[in-house]
Amino acid sequence: MSCRGEFMAPQTETKAKVGFKAGVKDYRLTYYTPDYETKDTDILAAFRVTPQPGVPPEEAGAAVAAESSTGTWTTVWTDGLTSLDRYKGRCYHIEPAETGEIKGHYLNATAGTCEEMIKRAVFARELGVPIVMHDYLTGGFTANTTLAHYCRDNGLLLHIHRAMHAVIDRQKNHGMHFRVLAKALRLSGGDHIHAGTVVGKLEGEREITLGFVDLLRDDYVEKDRSRGIFFTQDWVSLPGVLPVASGGIHVWHMPALTEIFGDDSVLQFGGGTLGHPWGNAPGAVANRVALEACVQARNEGRDLAREGNDIIRAAGKWSPELAAACEVWKEIKFEFPAMDTL
């Protein structure tokens, strides 16, 4: 079977409002304290940690989450903890930083059965965390929609991970393009999903990536074959899904990421945070400073594509954490052809 093109979803009203616009609850209500009035310049960012072999996952998750959460980061994601026998042993209370943000943890609800998956989601809700995650391809669409409805009904955000996608969408002679999997996910339900980076190690052709980002995020998308959009798609009232840029990104990528993905997106820095020579918290600060500098420059009308490096260098003059990160990542490049092509 080959599905390298796309499919068109019927233009019908849907009752399964599970997306970020209206499906679970407003993002701002989830990640900020009730008395905080959000501004257009506020930024939500995510931080990823994957425990390495030889390090007890419980200790790694607790230590990194606690340190990074005090460094102005918002979310900690641990996708490598599903093999632990004691699911409840993975959870730790993280105190909000002085920014007034509510700290979150992508508790992984993926399980071998729908029953166990829901048990994990229920436990996450009992802990008071704002978000859980699910591997929608390995878990399956039926399980994912079940979890999406549970999250919608119980005020949880749902992060979608796409483990196993490369086996399906990297094959040119069979399988499906990721734009097909992305549209199917929007129908199934979720708040945000990994969508490549254009830059970094999960890069794809810029226009093709932005094509399926629009299919995830926008209400109405015009046909444009040059961007991989083969049908005009009217999503009617079906809520959108936030694209997640993750994979090999660091502070020098920030101008490009800000320009490419714009507002209503999630940027996840794992190694780009953990790799900071001063530790996790300074790594989180460096990324946050770089991101806010780029957003401010964009809002002032500056050209991020042309002035991006200068913007990062200028911000590094008053942020020693960012200056140190710039030094570490200045020679890091991923030199291979784009994966997500037409």
Image (tube, helix red, strand yellow):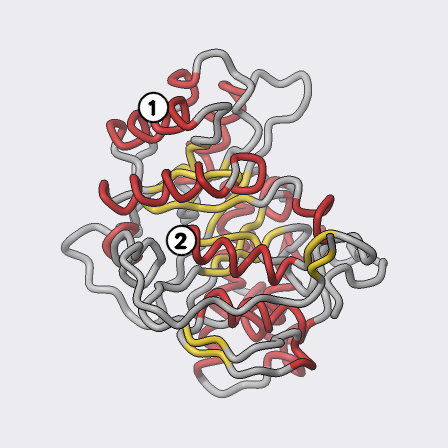
Q: Secondary structure at mark 1?
A: helix
Residue 42 in view (yes/no): yes
Q: Position of residue 18 (x, y in %)?
A: 33, 53
In this view, 148 is above or below 16: above
Residue 109 sits in quarter? top left
Q: Amino acid at mark 2?
A: Asp
Q: Amino acid at mark 1?
A: Lys
The front one of 161 and 52 is 161
Q: CA distance from mark 2 to mark 1?
A: 20 Å
Q: Which residue is mark 2?
A: 191
Q: Position of residue 118 (x, y in %)?
A: 35, 28
Residue 241 sits in quarter? bottom left
Q: Secondary structure at mark 2?
A: loop
Residue 123 sits in quarter? top left
The front one of 49 and 310 is 49
Q: Residue furthest bottom?
A: 301
In this view, 265 is above or below 206: above
Q: Residue furthest top?
A: 85
In this view, 85 is above or below 157: above
Q: Residue at x 25, y 54 (%)?
A: 25
Q: Which residue is mark 1?
A: 119
Left or right: residue 192 versus residue 228 is left
Q: Residue at x 42, y 33 (%)?
A: 107
Q: Quadrant of the C terminus?
A: bottom right
Q: Position of residue 30 (x, y in %)?
A: 27, 50
Q: Position of residue 38 (x, y in %)?
A: 25, 65
Q: Residue at x 40, y 44 (%)?
A: 145
In this view, 224 is above or below 314: below
The front one of 174 and 68 is 174
Residue 327 in view (yes/no): no
Q: Residues within 10 Å of mark 2 (few under 14, many from 20)?
A: many
In primary-sequence order, the first of circles 2 and 1 is 1
